[in-house]
Image: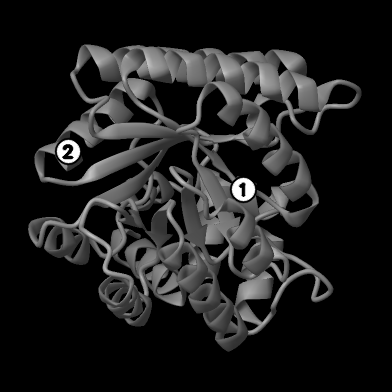
């Protein structure tokens, strides 16, 4: 019930305004969002890379309603890649792109526009010596996103995919994507979805996650295990042993600001540990979805508001 309420709030303009204008909010958000501009994002990436962790940077913003916004997002990623290259970070930092932010949902030729903009970003990433992962959004975009992924992989085979364990279709998608060289991030999912397409209970989602993880770990691809759940981290380690996978043939991923001690522990043990680092002004929807994913995040946020208030 709490998760459904929070996901509804992520779309509420009224609540968004209240949170964004609260004098303490930005201080609290700083734990989860690496600033508003690219230089702040690069500085956060430097700290993480220097600590032995890897990075995937996401410029927040998905409610693109005009072509100019899509082009602005594309150009922002090009600038980010230039700064990462100048700072010598592209060996440890990649970028994550939401196709909705580069035009996917625009009427008419939105899908083509998203492909063109994503192509330009992938090309710049390749030239800078890094990669791109296409974020997955709500279920209505899944087929379009996977279609654009297939198009991009013809020229940029290292382009990463994201699948969401709470969708009923994802186990089959994992079988299709678990191919040689295929980078696949498996997460639980963070959008409000109907029961017809998504598992609703935590236990069901966890079981689906494990089934999907088994498929990815048994295949020749490169699984990216996005979870903060200690049980799923332990299950991942067991599947690595069972499938005789070597360190470096998969990676763990966690969100910026969540379980940093565990992130450092995994990195210190020799594991590839990548931190998903969001930045930008459009942090409200992202933050609320993170709280919906993990109630402990909501507790932290409320405690911080009370303390700073």
Which percent across, then down, holds residue 16? 62, 49
Which one is in front, 34 or 49? Answer: 49
**Dot 2 lies on which element?**
helix
How crowded is the residue under tag 2: few (<14 C-alpha within 10 Å), some, or many (20+)? some
In this view, the residue farthest toward the right is 108
Q: Residue at x 58, y 56 (%)?
A: 163
Can residue 76 be seen by looking at this rendering? no
Q: Residue at x 41, y 60 (%)?
A: 226
Image quadrant where residue 8 sits: bottom right
| Residue at image mark 2 | 49
Q: CA distance from mark 1 to mark 2?
A: 25 Å
Which one is in front, 179 or 3? Answer: 179
Q: Relative to residue 203, is residue 278 drawn left or right?
A: left
Can residue 296 be seen by looking at this rendering? yes
Which percent across, then down, holds residue 84? 28, 20
Which one is in front, 155 or 74? Answer: 155
Q: How many marks?
A: 2
Tell me if residue 193 comes above or below residue 88 in the rendering: below
Which percent across, then down, holds residue 115? 69, 23
Which percent across, then down, holds residue 267? 15, 56
**Dot 1 lies on which element?**
loop
In this view, the residue farthest toward the bottom is 203
Colour scheme of this structure image? one colour
Q: Relative to residue 271, is residue 5 drawn left or right?
A: right
Tell me if residue 160 comes above or below residue 240 in the rendering: above
How crowded is the residue under tag 1: few (<14 C-alpha within 10 Å), some, or many (20+)? many
| Residue at image mark 1 | 136
The C terminus lies in quadrant: bottom left
Which one is in front, 7 or 156? Answer: 156
* Res. 36 mark: none
Q: Residue at x 55, y 68 (%)?
A: 292
Tell me if residue 97 comes above or below residue 7 in the rendering: above
């Amino acid at each position: 019930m709490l998760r459904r309420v929070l996901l509804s709030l992520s779309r509420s303009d009224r609540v968004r305004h209240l949170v964004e204008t609260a004098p303490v909010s930005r201080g609290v958000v700083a734990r989860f969002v690496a600033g508003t501009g690219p230089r702040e994002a690069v500085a956060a990436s430097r700290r993480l890379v220097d600590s032995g962790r890897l990075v995937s940077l996401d410029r927040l913003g998905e409610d693109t309603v005009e072509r100019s916004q899509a082009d602005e997002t594309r150009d922002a990623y090009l600038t980010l890649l230039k700064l990462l290259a100048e700072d010598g970070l592209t060996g440890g930092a990649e970028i994550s792109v939401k196709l909705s932010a580069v035009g996917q949902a625009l009427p008419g030729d939105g899908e083509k526009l998203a492909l063109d903009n994503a192509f330009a970003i992938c090309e710049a990433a390749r030239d800078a010596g890094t990669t791109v992962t296409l974020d997955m959004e709500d279920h209505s975009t899944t087929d379009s996103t996977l279609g654009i992924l297939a198009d991009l992989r013809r020229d940029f085979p290292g382009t990463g995919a994201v699948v969401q364990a709470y969708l009923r279709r994802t186990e089959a998608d994992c079988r299709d994507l678990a191919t040689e060289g295929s980078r696949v991030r498996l997460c639980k999912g963070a959008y409000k979805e109907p029961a017809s397409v998504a598992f609703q209970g935590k236990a069901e989602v966890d079981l689906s996650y494990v089934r999907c993880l088994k498929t990815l770990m048994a295949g020749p691809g490169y699984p990216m295990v996005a979870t903060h759940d200690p049980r799923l981290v332990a299950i991942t380690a067991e599947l690595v042993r069972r499938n005789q996978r070597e360190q470096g043939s998969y990676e763990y991923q966690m969100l910026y600001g969540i379980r940093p001690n565990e992130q450092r522990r995994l990195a210190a043990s020799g594991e590839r540990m990548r931190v998903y680092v969001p930045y930008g002004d459009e942090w409200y929807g992202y933050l609320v979805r993170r709280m919906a994913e993990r109630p402990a995040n909501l507790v932290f946020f409320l405690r911080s508001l009370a303390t700073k208030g």
